[in-house]
Amino acid sequence: MGFGLCAARLRLLLRPRPRPGPGPQRPRSAMAPRIGTHSGTFHCDEALACYLLRLLPQYRDAEIIRTREPQLLSECDVVVDVGGEYDPQKHRYDHHQRSFAQSMHCLRPDKPWKTKLSSAGLVYFHFGSQILASLLGLKEENPVVQALYDKLYENFVEEIDAIDNGIAQWDGEPRYAMTTNLSARVANLNPRWNDTDQDTEAGFKKAMELVGREFLDRFNYYHHSWLPARVLVEEAIQKRFKVDPSGEILVFSQGGCPWKEHLFSLESELGVEKPIKFVLYADQSGQWRVQCVPAGLHTFQNRLSLPEEWRGVRDEALSQLSGIPGCVFVHASGFIGGNRTREGALRMAQSTLARQTGSDAPSS
């Protein structure tokens, strides 16, 4: 995902800014706004939709009305996941009606995601930028807001949309069960089928707290960790020819950052002609790692793996085999290795590049 932010601009935008005050608190009364959703068994999508709406100033003190009675729903200021109607002008955000097939891409063709939206996705589509801008103290059109909007949809909200709409993540039978995702944990807050007390109100409040906590945790991670890492990766790309004449090796000034997605997007944005093969960084012990760049974000294949004969060999035996002092290890799969020094890790990458046969095919 690219969003056109140079390193200097991103540093400026990421500086801490004073946040606007919360404003006057609306007293809870009969005139407080009301958010309607369905009663009975609850799901992750409407729990998140209600939580997100309450992040907005106009709904901060809203009462959650859980009902399926049309008359009660008609009196609500906004209704999510019930009512059989999608009409943003009237603030009706249901996705269960037969006529509904909207995705992010349908509503905004510049967005790539084609997963059918749930009530969570609908609320996020219409209010997500406003919510993030408020949390950040920035304007909605700020590039940081837009970058986080895309990232949080792709890596948080879309999963909830897909699960609620019964869209499988893969074709055919999965290799193993996934039972601990956020949607499953929300479902487990419903009363058991054989519980005497089938009231769902307390469980729904817990569900809203759960999804809200995880949304804010993810938001804070992407804001304070993932997004600043782009600066580090861009600087390393700009300096790559000082590391090695091939331009295929990066050295990060700080280890542990989430670099892969940034590297792929920046290669495209900056017009990097020769794909980068290795990244070098110091680990927490002060030793150095040489890590292979994968062929893609969701594959275990590498653009170029460390040599087969090095894999699984350690310490002095590896140093003698490779002819490079200070070697610590090479993983059995060949995707990462270690050396006591930066120079040694660089030589491991350079030696691997020198062994290339000229094939550009990804290696495993």
Image: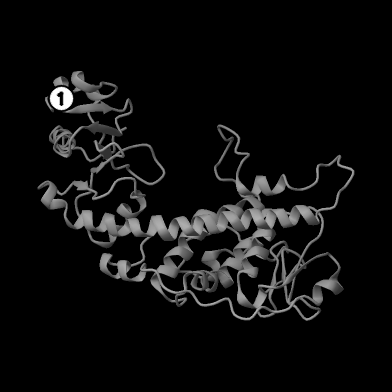
Which residue is located at x 67 percent, y 54 percent? Answer: 44
Residue reaching furthest to the right: 196
Q: How many marks?
A: 1
Depth order, front residue of 138/143: 138
Which residue does the numbered mark 1 point to in the structure image? 322
The amino acid beneath tag 1 is: Ser
- The quadrant of the rendering that contains the N terminus is bottom left
Q: What is the secondary structure assignment of the residue under circle 1? A: helix
- Is 308 above or below relative to 169? above
The quarter of the rendered structure image containing the C terminus is top left
- Is residue 173 among what the camera can see? yes
Q: Residue at x 61, y 41 (%)?
A: 180
Q: Is residue 208 above or below residue 79?
A: above
Count neighbours of disc 1 (C-alpha within 10 A) and say few if under 14, some if 14 to 19, many if 20 or more.
some
Quarter location, residue 172: top right
Q: What colour scheme has been applied to the protein in the rendered image?
A: one colour
For the point 80% across and 46% down, the residue is 191
Q: Is residue 224 left or right of residue 90?
A: left
